[in-house]
Image (spheres, rainbow, N blue to C red):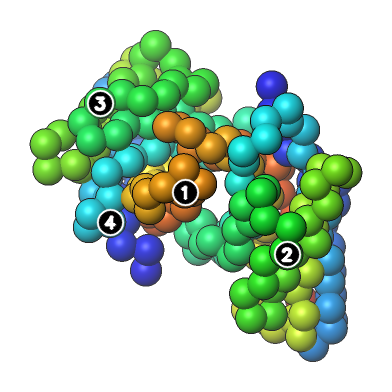
Amino acid sequence: AQTVTQSQPEMSVQEAETVTLSCTYDTSESDYYLFWYKQPPSRQMILVIRQEAYKQQNATENRFSVNFQKAAKSFSLKISDSQLGDAAMYFCAYSVGGSNYKLTFGKGTLLTVNP
Amino acid sequence: DSGVTQTPKHLITATGQRVTLRCSPRSGDLSVYWYQQSLDQGLQFLIQYYNGEERAKGNILERFSAQQFPDLHSELNLSSLELGDSALYFCASSVRRGGPTSTDTQYFGPGTRLTVL
């Protein structure tokens, strides 16, 4: 079974600083996709960034970037210039390519941003 | 705003009752997924529909069922409710972008918070 592990239940960062959230996954599939979702106090699930496993280049979305290490099955999220609005629960998720793209989620990392 | 709508936002009911949660996907999206988020189980995939047909099942209880209608909206029916069914239920939708290496990125609705008393 595919699993996603987020080893940091909580993290904190000072405003304007950089923080990295860790994620590892276990799979025997070759065609898969990785995602980071953000869940603020409103409980809305918001897509932050996605990575296709076949792409070697790390995905970047503005202040958010990933470090995708396929051999190590690691997919960390770096948030640069942290803002108060970045405070949220962050979920790493995985899906397998094909007809069904159901998401398997990690347990989440609660990020606090200190002013 | 993801474009996915869910109703109702909150639902409070009693054990043994039956409820229906409704989801309208983003315009043009053919796939609808249902997820349950609870404190003890985290975020779990329940079921997926694609263009009206069931495509995949996850950890969905037999007391739960779903369907997708011709207009592509979906309903999740929960019956014989138990205290442990209290959770946040999300609907997500996606569209296939085509090609052998396409990926379905899922966009989530705001969720329905179900409280079973």
For the residues labelled 4 and 2, the Cα–Cα distance comes to: 28 Å
What residue did someone put label 2 on? A58
Side (left or right) of B116 relative to A43: left
- Comparing marks 3 and 2, which lies closer to the viewer? 2
A37 in relation to A24, above or below: below
For the residues labelled 1 and 3, the Cα–Cα distance comes to: 21 Å
What residue did someone put label 4 on? B26
Three-letter amino acid code at the position of disc 2: Asn
Residue that appears at 36% across and 20% down: B64
Asked if disc 1 and disc 3 are in contact, CB closer than 8 Å, the reply is no
What residue did someone put label 3 on? B53
For the residues labelled 2 and 1, the Cα–Cα distance comes to: 17 Å
| Dots 2 and 1 on the same chain | no
- Comparing marks 1 and 3, which lies closer to the viewer? 1
Which quarter of the rendered picture does the C terminus of chain A lie within?
A: bottom right
Q: Quick check: can you spot residue B116?
A: no
Chain for numbered disc 1: B
Earlier sequence position, callout 1 versus callout 4 = 4
